[in-house]
Image: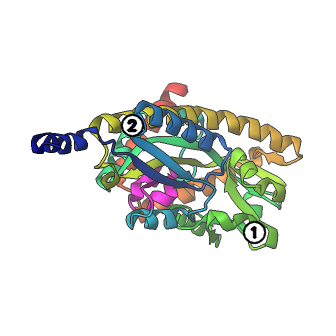
Amino acid sequence: MPKRLLILLLLLIPATQIHATTLKIATLAPDGTSWMNMLRSGAKELEQRTDGRVKLRFYPGGVMGNDNSVLRKIRIGQLHGGALTAGGLAAIYPDIQIYSFPFLFRSFAEVDFVRERMDPLLMAGLKKAGFVSYGISEGGFAYLMSQQPLGNVEQLLKRKIWTPEGDQISLSAFQSIGVSPVPLPLTDVLTGLQTGLIDTVGSSPSGAIALQWHTRIKYVADIPLIYLYGTLVIREQALKNIAPDDRKILREVMADRFRQINQQIRNDNLGARQVLEQRGIQFHQPKDGERESWQQLIGKVEADLKKENQLDPVLFQQIQQLLDDFRKTQR
């Protein structure tokens, strides 16, 4: 082969190579759930639109451990990202938990109003911490669910209540009202209910069914406790080998899926609530005499958490102002 032809071929080889990148993503979400079905649909579209240059490989159902374990594996390069809860992301960006402030929201209308204005700020905060977020998806409102009655505050204070491992806000909230909660990773909660280590959990209706917790509960306090949500994050460093155009496609596809997930989860929770009621689980709304004691409890939790100042006071003030503005329009 002539020397000039050989040199020309060598120069052309790099230009014709396809540099495929497979991003490894872990999550606690079980396979077969709406969350995972949407993510897999997004991965298929992403692979098609990038001609196979970018692929997503998922590790669902907690096979890579809890959120803390997933973050550790991301840091050492074993994983590139995760679909994580807000509490799980607190280790890298504490303010991501700000929507989880107990009793913050009273309705989904309030959630939608605030999130439209605040989500971009939280996603920017994650980016400063070195992680790219592709959208925030709700998990629904968590309600206190128990094996024992939860008709009033006195009954609540006697319960053995679970808090997510690493969720300092929930831990502090319960401690402020004289409850000593039991911190556990998500994967140990069902065992805790079965053994009696705990008898009360905070969960959305669909989450309780997906995780089989509904088999161990009989009563629900029908007051939104906290707003549950999560996001898909990928370490920014893992994206550097992906061409800008492909990164744009990745963002378009996954942002679209997270918008769909957000609505689907809301619909799933409405359906799941009906399933729980059909199984005989009792939803208890406070009566007039009980409502005042619940409101006093809520006020104490809010005041104590504000004193501890665990979250950015500027962000929190923005949310409070938005809620005040919205509530004025509803009167």
Colour convention: rainbow
Q: Among all residues in the image, which is located at the extreme left?
A: 4
Q: Amino acid at mark 2?
A: Arg
Quarter holding the C terminus is: top right
Mark 1, Cα crowd under 10 Å, few <14 / some 14-19 / many 20+, is few
Q: Kindly tell me whether residue 114 is visible in this rendering.
A: no
- Give the residue number, with chain letter if any, for mark 2: 251
Q: Disc 1 marks which amino acid? A: Thr
Q: Which residues are magenta?
A: 79-100
Q: Quadrant of residue 3?
A: top left
- Quadrant location of the N terminus in the rendered image: top left
Residue at 75% x, 35% y: name it: 271
Q: Does dot 1 land on a helix, a strand or a loop?
A: helix
**Pointer 2 local density, CA inside 10 Å: few below 14, some 14–19, many at least 20:** some
Residue at horizontal 36%, vertical 55%?
312
Identify the element where label 2 is drawn. Answer: helix
- 284 on left or right of 319: right
**Up-down relation of residue 160 to residue 30 (above or below):** below
- Residue 191 marker: 1
Residue 258: image x %, image y %?
Answer: 51, 37
The verdict on residue 147 being magenta is: no
Q: Mark 2, mark 1: which one is toward the viewer?
A: 2
**Residue 24 location, x and y as percent?**
47, 54
Where does residue 194 sit, x and y in percent of width and height? 81, 68
Q: Nearer the viewer, residue 269 or 55?
A: 55
Q: Kindly tell me whether residue 276 is visible in this rendering.
A: yes
Residue 79's place in the image compared with 254, above or below, is: below
Q: Which mark is residue 96?
A: none
The Cα atoms of the two marked residues, 2 and 1, are separated by 38 Å
